[in-house]
Amino acid sequence: MSRSLNKVTLIGNLGADPEVRSTTGGNRVATFSLATSRSWNSPSGEKQEKTEWHRCVVWNSKVSTLADIVERYLKKGDKVFVEGRIEYRQWQDKENQTRYMTEINVREMIMLSGRGGAGADGTDGEAPSRSRASNDRSRGAVAGSSASSGGGGASGEFEDFKGSLEEEDDDLPF
């Protein structure tokens, strides 16, 4: 039996504030558009740039409140890392036209902009506002199926380890 993999990894900026809604079953879902850009020089030396837009969908689950985290902490312009799977949907609209949509079903997310919002380059130099539930608290703000959303606010969690982010670790081999 052969195995397959459907995995998408993106780093980009939100094009608008996320939209959060509840399903009829009471489940919460957040959607947002994520822009990724690439640039290159044409053969004539002219700088070229192309931006791709990705529709990201984030669900709450039994082990994660990721949609709630998106609603609370993300806003237009924020830089985020998302990881998930690509899904294609099609449906018939009111005029009986077949419509297609490509979505990224987000399983994990790292907030890269920090607490104070995005700067000109998408960073603001501040430490992140949330962390993974594991002991690695220096990577950035992480949320996902393995993240702990806890009952307290992020600011309490952030204040607990803020000093450790600024300390140097002399045991590093590099």
Image (cartoon, rainbow, N blue to C red):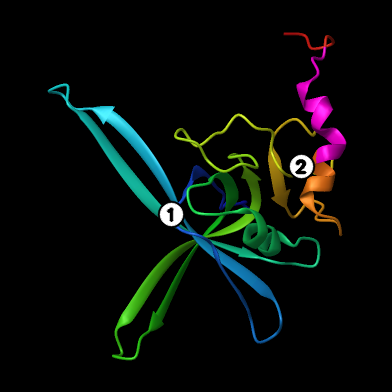
Q: Is residue 39 inside the magenta stretch?
A: no
Assess disc 2: are there few (<14), some (14-19) or many (≥20) residues with their C-alpha within 10 Å of its C-alpha.
many
**What is the span of residues highlighted in magenta in the rendered image?**
159-169
User: SS at mark 2?
Assistant: loop
On the question of residue 135 being in view, the answer is no
Q: Where, by quadrant of the figure, is residue 137 drawn?
A: top right
Specify whether 147 is left or right of 94.
right
Percent across and percent down for residue 2 are 61, 51
Q: Is residue 146 left or right of residue 53?
A: right
**Identity of the residue drawn at 79% across and 41% down:** 158
Task: Looking at the picture, tell me which residue is in the foreground, 123 or 1.
Answer: 123
Asked whether residue 20 appears in the rendered view, the answer is yes
At which x and y percent is residue 78? 53, 46
Q: Residue at x 71, y 82 (%)?
A: 26
- Asked if the residue at tag 2 contacts the one at tag 1, i.e. Cβ–Cβ closer than 8 Å, the answer is no
The quarter of the image holding the C terminus is: top right
Residue type of the residue flagged with mark 1: Gly
CA separation in Å, label 1 and label 2 = 24 Å
Residue at figure coordinates x 35%, y 86% from the top left: 93
**Residue labelled with disc 2:** 131
Magenta segment includes 167: yes
From the image, tell me which residue sits under label 1. Answer: 15
For residue 16, above or below residue 52: below
Which of the two discs, 1 and 2, labels the residue nearer the N terminus? 1
Identify the amino acid type marked 2: Ser
Residue sitting at the far left: 44
Quarter occupied by the N terminus: bottom right
